[in-house]
Amino acid sequence: MGEQVISLAAKGEIEEIGGKARNLMDLMAAGFPVPEGWVVSTSAYEQFLDRNGLRGRISEALQDLDLKDAVKVVRCAESIRGWMMAGDLDSELAERLLKETAIFGPSGLWAVRSSAIAEDLEQASFAGQQDTYLNVTRERLAESVKKCWASYWNDRAIEYRHDKGVGHLDAGMAVVVQRMVNADSSGIMFTSDPITGDEKIMIESSWGLGESIASGLVTPDRFVCDSSNGEVKESKINSKTQAIFLSPEGEKAVDLPESERNRPSLTKG
């Protein structure tokens, strides 16, 4: 079996680290300021399944599942997630996570993010099918990794894999553990139009953490840029009444002052 924990500063095969982790590694290698982190590999996930005898139980539960019966799918998914959370995590893996993150001090907070092998297939996009956990303390890392693995077995992900012809036990699941950054502003960038496929860069941004965009708390600013030179071709600055920032208690939504609401959350420079 391969390495259980791989640094984002290293190189890894997509079969071991999944799509999201591979993209983060490529960005880091290209010199972009990517927050430090590690990948709990697909090997660790496979070992967890085998260690707890889950492969056979899951296969049996799915074998006769009527995917047209939404109630049964939900119940089946709940059962599998329960088995995952009750499973015993390799103590060496838990200790390795504590050791690697210790260099950032006991008060550091972490993002635990899914990185499934099937996340960015050409014929399907599995982004958003699994869960992300933010503001995770070192003491909760091992539990959060299991929760991330368990989210692979939510009802919407089971139905989506079936619809796309992806075997439930064929596609591995890695997890990214990445240092949280209390961002001044955050955003999402597409290197092509997600609807038309046109070659133009599209950016949506807002103040604070990106969760304010993902959760629909705000209507973000929107920028369209030329993919050849980065020149801004279009921009729409929206009124952003709130933002989410880190606090000692975790994420906190705050009301923005009037002077910030209509100010661009990103500027050129």
Image: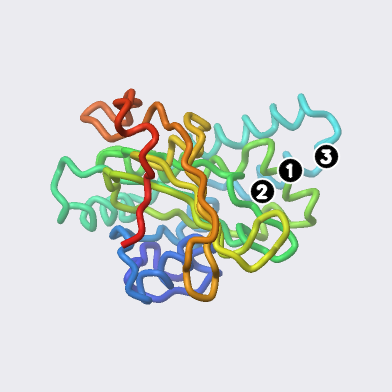
Q: Quadrant of residue 67?
A: top right
**Amino acid type, residue under disc 3 in the picture:** Asp
Marks 2,1: beta carbons within 8 A: yes
Packing grade of label 2 (10 A; few <14, some 14-19, many >=20) is: few
Q: Mark yes or no: residue 87 visible.
A: no
- Foreground of the two, 203 or 248: 203
Q: CA distance from mark 2 to mark 1?
A: 6 Å
Q: Badge 3: how crowded within 10 Å, few (<14), some, or many (20+)? A: few
The reply to whether dot 1 and dot 3 touch (C-beta < 8 Å) is no
Residue 185, image quadrant: top left
Alpha-carbon span between mark 1 and mark 3: 8 Å
Residue type pointed to by label 2? Gly
Image position, residue 221 (x, y; %): 47, 43
The residue indicated by pointer 3 is 64
Label 2 secondary element: helix
Give the residue at x 33% y 43%: 141
Residue 18 place in picture, x, y as percent:
53, 63
Task: Tell me, yes or no, if residue 126 can be seen here.
Answer: yes
Mark 2 vs mark 3, foreground winner is 3
Point out which mark residue 189 bears.
none
Tell me the quadrant of the picture where the C terminus can be found: bottom left
- Residue of label 2: 56
Q: Which residue position holds label 1?
A: 60
Q: Is residue 211 above or below residue 242?
A: below
Q: Residues within 10 Å of mark 1 (few under 14, many from 20)?
A: few
Residue 221 versus residue 109: which sits nearer the camera?
A: 221
Q: Does residue 109 appear to the left or right of 233 in the view shown?
A: left
Disc 2 and disc 3: Cα gap in Å?
Answer: 13 Å
For the point 27% across and 35% down, the residue is 246
